[in-house]
Amino acid sequence: MLDATIDADVFRESVDAIAALVTECRLHATEQGLRTRTVDTANVAMISLELDKDVFESYQATSSEMGIDIVKIKNVLSMMGKGDPVHLALAEESRKLEVSFQSYQYSITLLDTNTIRKDPNAPTIELPGKVVISGAALSAAIKAASVVSDKIALGIDPEKGIFYMEAEGDTDHIRLELGDDKLISLVPVQARSLFSLDYLKDMGKTMSKAEKVEISLGIDHPVEFTFDIADGKGHVMYLLAPRIEAD
Amino acid sequence: MLDATIDADVFRESVDAIAALVTECRLHATEQGLRTRTVDTANVAMISLELDKDVFESYQATSSEMGIDIVKIKNVLSMMGKGDPVHLALAEESRKLEVSFQSYQYSITLLDTNTIRKDPNAPTIELPGKVVISGAALSAAIKAASVVSDKIALGIDPEKGIFYMEAEGDTDHIRLELGDDKLISLVPVQARSLFSLDYLKDMGKTMSKAEKVEISLGIDHPVEFTFDIADGKGHVMYLLAPRIEAD
Amino acid sequence: MLDATIDADVFRESVDAIAALVTECRLHATEQGLRTRTVDTANVAMISLELDKDVFESYQATSSEMGIDIVKIKNVLSMMGKGDPVHLALAEESRKLEVSFQSYQYSITLLDTNTIRKDPNAPTIELPGKVVISGAALSAAIKAASVVSDKIALGIDPEKGIFYMEAEGDTDHIRLELGDDKLISLVPVQARSLFSLDYLKDMGKTMSKAEKVEISLGIDHPVEFTFDIADGKGHVMYLLAPRIEAD
C-alpha cells in the first residue's frame, strides 16, 4: 500500500536520475520512504536512489514492491506543471498505480516484478580517493572529453594535489586539472581509472544540477558518484565499472 | 478582385487554423470578408473559417474564389515580422496572389480550384451538450490523453454536472473531470463520443490560444468546437466525426 | 610558432565564417596576424579571412602554416563559455595545436597541409556596382528568396537608384527593391547576376551579424561580399561565382 503526495519537480528529478541508466526498475515502498537499486542491462552501471518520507508532503506506506516502467512515468510527468503536488496511490494487492495532479487521474499498470532483474547487492569495494566537486563542473568536464574521445580517465595526483581527467582520441587529446581552488574538497590518494563516456554523459546530465557530487576513485576500480536531490532529503549513488585500458 | 491589408499575426493565426487540417483550400472573397469551408482528405474533420472585413486594416473585394496552397503561404508567412501589415492583392481574372510586406513582394500562383474538392455543406447535426472551456485547458487535456492512448472519449455527466474526458490505452488509463469551477459554462445534457487523438492534437494546438472554446457534444455523434480569433472578428469552427467504440 | 590569446567569441565568429564554406583550410600565421584564403570543393565560392594581431589579447608568431580541421575546432569551441580567453599555441616543428581555456587543455593534431588544396590567387575581377547594406537586411533577403526558389538574382538599377533581388520559382516569384532609405550607400552602376541560394544561405548566416556588408556586383559576374568581424579588426571577403541564367 502506498498513499503519498510529492512535489512534481522532486518527482521529476528522481525519475530522471533513474532514467539515466534504466528503462524499468523495482521500486520499494517502506514506512521510511521509497528506494530503488538497479543495474543497467549491460551490468556496467548501478543506481541506488532513496527518498526519505520527509521528501513527501504526505506519506503513508506498508512494505510493497512495484515494477515501474520509467518511460511511461516520464510521459505522464511531462504533463505536470512546475510545483504541482502529485498524488501517488497503490491499493493493497493492486497492480495499478494511481497518479493524480490537478484534475487529472492516471491509472498506470505496473510491470510484473518477476520480469525485472533482482536487486543487486550493495557494493562493497573500497575507493580511497575522494573528490568533492560541483555538479556543473563535473558535467562540463564530461562534455569536454566527449569532444575528442569515447572514454575518459579520472584520477587523483596526490603529489600535485589535483583531480584530473584525461581523454585520448585517435588524433586529439584533452587534459583537465583541478586543484584546491576549483574543488570543494580532495582526499589526495593515488587513483586513476578509465570509463566509458556513453554512461558518464547520461549520468552527467543528472548530476549537473547537484550543488556537490562526491567522487570516489581507486586504481583501475569503479567510480562512485554520490549526491543529494530534493534539498538533501533524497540521495542518489551511481556506480560505474572501469574499462580496460588498451595500448 | 481582392485588395486588402491585414496584420501579419492575425493572418498567421488564420492560416495555422486551416493548416491543422488541410494543405490546400478554396478561399472565398466577398464584399463581407474572406471565408473557407473545407474537409480533410479522409472526410473525418471539417474546418469553417470566417474573417469579417473588420479584421482587415483595409478591405475591398468583389466575389472571387482562390485555390490556396497552404504550405506555400506558411513559408511566406515565416518571413513576416510580428505585426507587419501584409498586403494581399488579386487582380480581376488573375491567377496570381500578390503578397507584400516591408519591401518584399511575393507573387504566388493560385491552384486551379477545379482540382480542389467542392465546399462541403454546412453541418446540420444537433449536438445538445454544450461546454465552454479555456483553449489552454482543452489543449492540455488532449495532450494528457495522448500519453496513454490514440483515442479519447469526451462526455458530459449531467447528474454530476461535469464535463469529462477519458482515454483507455492497452494497459493504462486517464480520466479528467471538470466541474463548474474549471469551466466557463456547461449545458448538462447526457453526452459521450469517442474521437481520434491524431486530429484533436492538431486542432488543440490552434485552440490553445483561444480565450474560450465552445464544445458541442451528443451521444456517438461528432464534436463541434467553435472559437474566435483576431479579437472576436474571426470565427473558426472545427467539426470532427466520432470513432466507433470497440470492445 | 604561434603563441596567442583570443576572446572565445571572436574566435567563434572567425571559425563560423570559414565553416560556412569549407571543412578544412590552411591557416597562415605571420608576425602580423592569422589569415586564410580558400575555395570550396566545387570551386564556386572563396573565403578570405584576416585577423590582425590587434584582434588578439596577446600575439606572437613566426611564419607558419597549419592544416585546420574546421569541424574539430568547432566541437572544441562548443565547450567554451562566452568571453573565455582562449590560448592557442603551436610549438616550432610541432604538428599539434594546443587550445586552452579555463582549466581545459586540448591538443589537436593538425592536418597535413599537403592534403589540402593550394591557396587560390587573389581575385582580380572588376565589379563596379557597389551596395552597402546591414548584414541583417541582407540575410533576411536571402531567406525570403529561398521560400520560392533555389537561385536569386542580385542587381542594381541605376535609373531607379535601387538595389534589387529577385527570385523566380516554378510557379512563384519574389522581388525586393531597396532604395536610399534602406541602404547605407549605393554606387548606381548597372549590374545583375544570378547566384545559387545554397551558398548564399550559409554565407548569410555569418553576415547577418555584421553591421554593414559591402556587396560588389557586375553583369553576369561574381559577387563579392566584404565585412568586418571583431570590432573591425578582422576582415572577411566572400566571393561567389554566378550561375548561368536558363530560359
Image: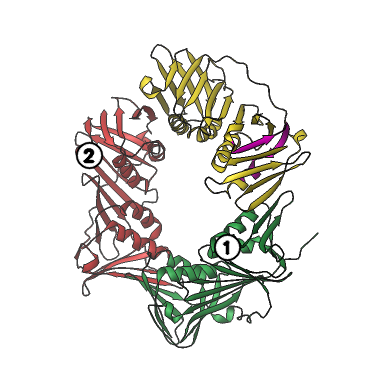
Chain colours: A green, B red, C yellow
Q: Is residue C60 above or below residue A207?
A: above
Q: Which residue is drawn at 63% across and 19% down?
A: C123
Residue C86 vertical position relative to residue C173 in the rendered view, above or below? below
Q: Residues within 10 Å of mark 2 (few under 14, many from 20)?
A: many
Residue at image position (76%, 41%) is: C95
Q: Position of residue B10 (x, y in %)?
A: 29, 41
**In the depicted structure, whether residue C147 falls above or below residue B122:** above
- Quadrant where the N terminus of chain A is found in the figure: bottom left
| Residue stretch in magenta | C56-75
Residue hosting label 2: B55
Quarter occupied by the C terminus of chain A: bottom right
- Picture quadrant where residue A130 is located: bottom right
Alpha-carbon span between mark 1 and mark 2: 52 Å
* Image side of residue B245 versus residue A200, left or right: left
On what subunit does the disc labeled 1 rest?
A
Please state the horizontal and vertical placement of residue A79, each as a whole percent of the image.
40, 64
Out of A184 and A154, give the one closest to the viewer.
A184
Residue at image mark 1 = A204
Q: Which of marks 1 and 2 is in front?
A: 1
Q: Which amino acid does label 1 sit on?
A: Gly
Residue C195, how many percent across, how many down? 54, 25
